[in-house]
Image (spheres, rainbow, N blue to C red):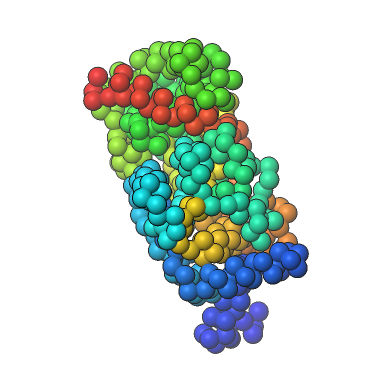
Amino acid sequence: MTHYVQATATQRMLLTIAALAAAISPISVHANDAAAWRAIQTQAQGQTVYFNAWGGDQSTNAYIDWVARQIKAVSGITLKHVKVTDTAEAVQRIEAEKRAGRNVAGSVDLLWVNGENFQRLKKAGLLYGPWAEKLPNWQYIDMSKPVRQDFSESTDGLEAPWGAARLTFLADRHNVPLPPTSTDQLLAFAQAHPGRVTYPSPPDFYGTTFLKQLLLMLAPSPEDLNQPVTPESFARNAPALWAYLDKLHPFLWRMGKAFPSGVAPMHRMLADGELLLSITFNPNEGASLIAQGRLPASVYAFGFSDGMIGNVHFLAIPYNASAKAGAQVVVNFMLSPQAQAKKADPSMWGDPTVLNITALPPKLKAAFDHLPSNSPESAVPTLAEPDASWMSALESAWIERYGAGR
């Protein structure tokens, strides 16, 4: 320890680069796999990777900037964050390139993709792979998580898990000492506090996810949700959701005649006391916002006792990516214990890891030692996402029924 403290700045930089190199190219792989990986690393050197990812959160953006600096220092890869407001924008660009015959040198090298868009790209044959399970750092993935299923669609090695997520409510303990932990309790809570509960308007991701959460709780035939939606299954299950919302909306913020555009304004209204509840799809976001000074320290996370909808979010490489090798090296680094621990740190992003921490070698496990211990909210069960087709069906029906202040 004494020698490390007295090390020069150059020595510390070399130690850091050595650690990063180990994260990008671990040694515990078979010789043939190691040779193939070295070839990919060689090809990746000097490439520019255009990473199309949602740019609406400053914590996420800061983390991607951190990854870009690390990957540049070790591999010479330039990671460019192309900030999108909706993943569908990048998907449409890939589809347009396919129609134009641009089957090489595509504009998107790496894509942060959700289940709906993954299914769309996969069915159209617009993804490169399989590649994900060949990454050296795949060995650290927690296979108890749904890392091979995305919105009920098999990933088939066409995308790599990046983080875990679950719909989560946020409340201030000073204002809400006992949170609602069921749909019935949420309705009663809203009725007792008119104007201080709301949710984002679909097709905002968080608003649609809130609808799916309610549908999972209320559907008379929940097994239907695991299959592609049909007119019959929608007619069988959706009325229970509409009946609930018809009771809830009159007690919402602005009497359910208007809705926030996303969760950012809800977080601000929670901080100001205008709202009593906010929502997120990251169980650690409350801690992260507290660390950033954007929410008071008395804010806590909670969920329904029967469970909250959750999934794993993924990274994919388009079929016509210009820098396929570089994209794989970037993702492999993102799956390293060092990068996953940095991402899980509430002071950075707070996005939960997809690694099996308990199975990591002690030296790698140490990267997670400084993180806060699990909160009581972590005991909330995670419920599987419905089939991706339910997402657009719910959005369209909600907009027709409740959109534009109806």
Nearest to the observer: residue 285 or residue 145 = 145
What residue is at 48 percent from the left and 52 percent from the top? Answer: 318
Give the image location of residue 331, x and y in percent.
55, 59
Left or right of residue 185: residue 395: left
Residue 15 rendering spot, x and y as whole percentages:
60, 79
Determine the residue located farthest toward the front in the rendered image: 101
Nearest the eye: 401 or 231: 231
Residue at the spot 68% in from the left edge and 45% down from the top edge: 143
Q: Which quadrant would the C terminus be assigned to in this image?
A: top left
Residue beneath the point at 70% across and 67% down: 34
Find residue 19 and report its image quarter.
bottom right
Q: In the displayed structure, would residue 7 be above or below residue 134?
A: below
Look at the picture and state if 174 lies above or below 26. Answer: above
> Looking at the image, which is closer to me, 388 or 35?
35
Residue 42 spot, x, y in % from top left: 58, 73
Residue 118 seen in the current view:
no
Q: Which quarter of the figure has residue 197?
A: top left
Evaluate whether residue 107 shows in this view: yes
Q: Looking at the figure, which quarter contains the N terminus?
A: bottom right
